[in-house]
Amino acid sequence: ESLSPHTPRPPHFETELPTLVNSKQYRRIIKRREARSKLAQLRSLKIQKLKKSGSYIHESRHKHAMKRPRGEGGRFLTKDELEEYYKKNPGEKQPGSSSGSVSKKYKKTESNVSTASAASASSIDDFFNGS
């Protein structure tokens, strides 16, 4: 039975036209579709489970965010606003301000850089001058 232009068609008729694929790739395409659908189901189950339990996907990120100071409307403060906040609230612990901070130990200053470059320049001159 052929479909004439006046024959009512099912709603999915025009959207589900067959897709032509390489016959050697067909098996792998089907396998990939099955894997994607399985992952989608697992993902939706995980999200539903998290919604029911009320927990977070990454608990440590949540804890960190809860410790960060916030401004109006609950947004996080910018770097300048944080500096001002810690000046007003000296009792608050600043993140990364522990006694063994690596960034402070190895922080370069202009005086360190200039003396290092001067020392290396003199050693290069000594090498080429034979001293």
Image (tube, rainbow, N blue to C red):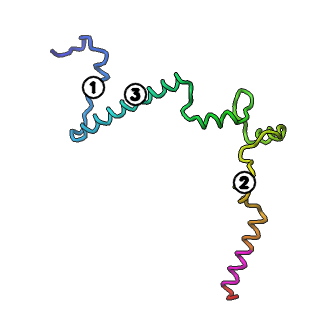
Q: Are marks 2 and 1 in contact (CB under 8 Å)?
A: no
Q: Amino acid at mark 1?
A: Leu
Residue 5 placement: quadrant: top left
Q: Nearer the viewer, residue 101 or 115?
A: 101
Sort mark 1 into few (<14), some (14-19) or many (20+) by Cα contacts within 10 Å. few
Q: Amino acid at mark 3?
A: Gln
Vertical position of residue 62 compared to residue 116: above or below: above
Q: Is residue 3 left or right of residue 131?
A: left
Question: What's the residue at 21%, 14% (across, down)?
Answer: 4
- Please name the residue that numbered disc 1 is placed on: 17
Between circles 1 and 3, the one closer to the viewer is: 3
Query: Considering the numbered disc 1 on the image, is that residue within a helix, a strand or a loop?
Result: loop
Distance between the Cα atoms at labels 2 and 1? 66 Å
Q: Position of residue 103 (x, y in %)?
A: 70, 55
Q: Are marks 2 and 3 in contact (CB under 8 Å)?
A: no
Q: Amino acid at mark 2?
A: Gly
Residue 26 placement: quadrant: top left
- Please name the residue that numbered disc 2 is placed on: 100
Sort mark 3 into few (<14), some (14-19) or many (20+) by Cα contacts within 10 Å. few
Q: Which residues are magenta?
A: 119-127
Distance between the Cα atoms at labels 1 and 3? 26 Å
> Which sits earlier in the primary sequence, circle 2 or circle 1?
1
Query: Considering the numbered disc 3 on the image, is that residue within a helix, a strand or a loop?
Result: helix
* Image quadrant in which the N terminus is located: top left
Q: Position of residue 3 (x, y in %)?
A: 20, 15
The secondary structure that most of the magenta stretch takes on is: helix
Distance between the Cα atoms at labels 2 and 3? 47 Å
- Please name the residue that numbered disc 3 is placed on: 41
Question: What's the residue at 65%, 37% (across, down)?
Answer: 64
